[in-house]
Image (cartoon, rainbow, N blue to C red):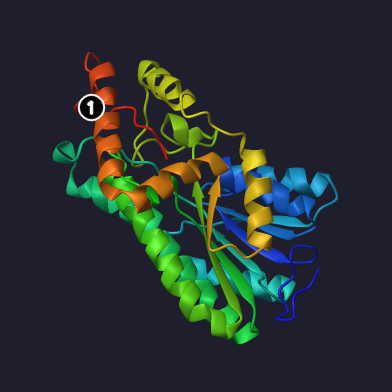
Amino acid sequence: MMTQSGLRVFEGAVALVTGAGSGIGKALSKNLSSRRCVVVAADRDLEPAQEVAGALQREGRVATATLLDVRNLARFQETVAQTVETHGRLDFLFNNAGIVGGGEIFNSTIDEWRAIIEVNLSGVIHGVLAAYPLMRRQGFGHIVNTASMAGLVPSPLGASYSTTKHAVVGLSKALRAEAASAGVRVSVLCPGAVRTPILEGGRHGVLGREIPEEEQRKAMRELSERLRPVDPLRFASAALDAVARNKPIIIVPRWWKVLWWMDRASPSLSLLAAQWLFETTIREFSSTQYTRGTPPQPRL
């Protein structure tokens, strides 16, 4: 299917996916490939990206892997240029790479804040700066930024993460308004709980630090299960259906929209609910060693 602007949705399109080695990025890559999209799987760890691309190639799909640390703007620009040189176009950029952060604000450090901002916010900005000028010259393209429900509603015990995700939502909305006249689409994904490594601290740990204690990972898993995490492939399928419809803000699973509606209808009620969630979580884990450090937090 082809729009008048030239954007291919999705057959024959070329999609660059960051953070493609695991989680949502891996699921998006698989689902894009199943829709006959050419996939460039980018990740700061090359081996997982190669595994994703290799699996797709064995299914007869067109996919490649590339090393990309989204914190490096020059490397991001090189990756976009290489993609266009190889495939002749770039239809989609999925700005998906991210890390998790948590804990109470009073116990956070400036280094932790910088670490999560560099990946979750600067990484998205770098993707926009690398791909948007090219898409303007093409006259088509679709930038899809991964934020979170934590970018739409209050998220205690995850202030640094929530801060970056709110910023990604704001960036996406502003860019969508600016880019429309140039034929470039912009959407922002706001997942609820998705069954990915991030529920246990992520592949790179919390703020890039490993979480060696199985007790901590178990506690994070138990808390996350209460949020009814959805399978990542199911998430990717629903998310890409919404991307195809050019939805500006995409919330999956859909029932999480209730929290967004509540926050817009009654910010005071939303803050009271967030306070209750914070106090309940702290009370439940008050006996553990990480309550005042990096507690298991509901990842939105």
Side of 55 relative to 149 (left or right): right
> Which quadrant of the structure image shows residue 137?
bottom right
> Which quadrant of the structure image shows residue 15?
bottom right
Counting every numbered tag in the picture gives 1
Image x and y of residue 53, in percent: 70, 49
Residue at (64, 56) in percent of width and height = 242
Q: Is residue 172 above or below residue 65?
A: below
**Mark 1 belongs to which amino acid?**
Glu
Extreme residue in the top direction: 287
Q: Is residue 197 above or below residue 114?
A: above
Residue at (71, 66) in percent of width and height = 14
Q: Is residue 118 above or below residue 213?
A: below
Side of 176 relative to 158 (left or right): right
Image x and y of residue 232, in percent: 61, 38
Q: Which residue is mark 1?
A: 279
Side of 295 relative to 22 (left or right): left
SS at mark 1 in the image: helix
Q: Is residue 175 visible?
A: yes
Extreme residue in the left direction: 106
Q: For the C terminus, which image quadrant?
A: top left
Residue at (85, 50) in percent of width and height = 60
Residue at (14, 39) in percent of width and height = 106
Extreme residue in the right direction: 60
Image x and y of residue 160, in percent: 28, 47
Q: For the N terminus, which image quadrant?
A: bottom right
